[in-house]
Image: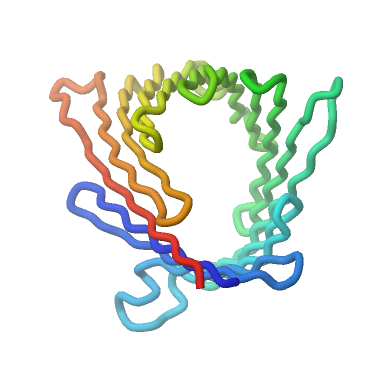
Amino acid sequence: MMKASVKGKYDGDKSTGVGSLAFNAGDLKLRATMTDATFVAGPTLNGLSLAVEKPGFFIVEYNVPKKDVRFQFMNTVRVAEKPLNLTYIHSRADNRTIVDGSLLIDPANKLSVNHMVGTNNCKLKYTYAHGKIATFEPCYDFAKNAWDFAVSRRVYGDDVLKATYQTSSKLLGMEWSRTSKSTGSFKVCASVNLAEEVKTPKLTAETTWNLEM
């Protein structure tokens, strides 16, 4: 089976697009991703990346124009009978390594940590899910010594409303999204910087279409 997806994004006076094509090869999934830069000036290698994935185990992605390889490895271990999901990501070009872990305490509570190796960039996030209706996520950023907060609530079936606030930048955001397993997703975001004297909202819209062939 082959799957294709197209994502379009409108950000102020700028619009961008990303397309991907994936198909299964046994236990592996092969994927090619292209951006609008691949086709704007005629077919080129700009914005093209190729990936090999074994779901739940690893992803190897090659950025063709940058000649950069990105490795991602996933594993799950049990700590006190609780599943701990671990992800290791390494980009060769900028020699950057990220380690991510999430511990599912119970269906309603999850603890996550994200750390960039060799730096003080580390985030600790707690997620509380109230059934399948609402989610509360406080996150502490050690590099900025500041808290971020996110609250989301499901409304009208597949519609989700989400509010975010970053205390370090005083950035307040609102998001409305709708996801369909068969057709794709649609998202509209609005944000405003409360630290600015003139508080002008910034609007973005993003839509994704999925197709199985």
132 vs 44: above or below: above
Q: Quadrant of residue 107?
A: top right
- The answer to whether one can see residue 67 in this image is no
Q: Nearer the viewer, residue 144 or 167?
A: 167
Residue 152 locus on image (x, y percent) = 42, 24
> Where the N terminus falls, by quadrant?
bottom right
Residue sticking out furthest to the left? 198
Task: Count every numbered label the image shows and give the total.
Answer: 0
Residue 204 locus on image (x, y percent) = 26, 43
Residue 94 locus on image (x, y percent) = 60, 53
Q: Residue at x 61, y 27 (%)?
A: 122
Q: Residue at x 38, y 32 (%)?
A: 160
Decide if residue 108 is on the left or right side of residue 56: left
Q: Residue at x 56, y 18 (%)?
A: 128
134 vs 84: above or below: above
- The answer to whether one can see residue 31 in this image is yes
Q: Residue at x 21, y 23 (%)?
A: 196
Scheme of colours in the image? rainbow
Residue sticking out furthest to the front? 157
110 vs 73: above or below: above
Q: Nearer the viewer, residue 195 or 114?
A: 114
Decide if residue 60 is on the left or right side of residue 39: right
Q: Quadrant of residue 116?
A: top right
Residue 32 locus on image (x, y percent) = 54, 70
107 vs 115: above or below: above
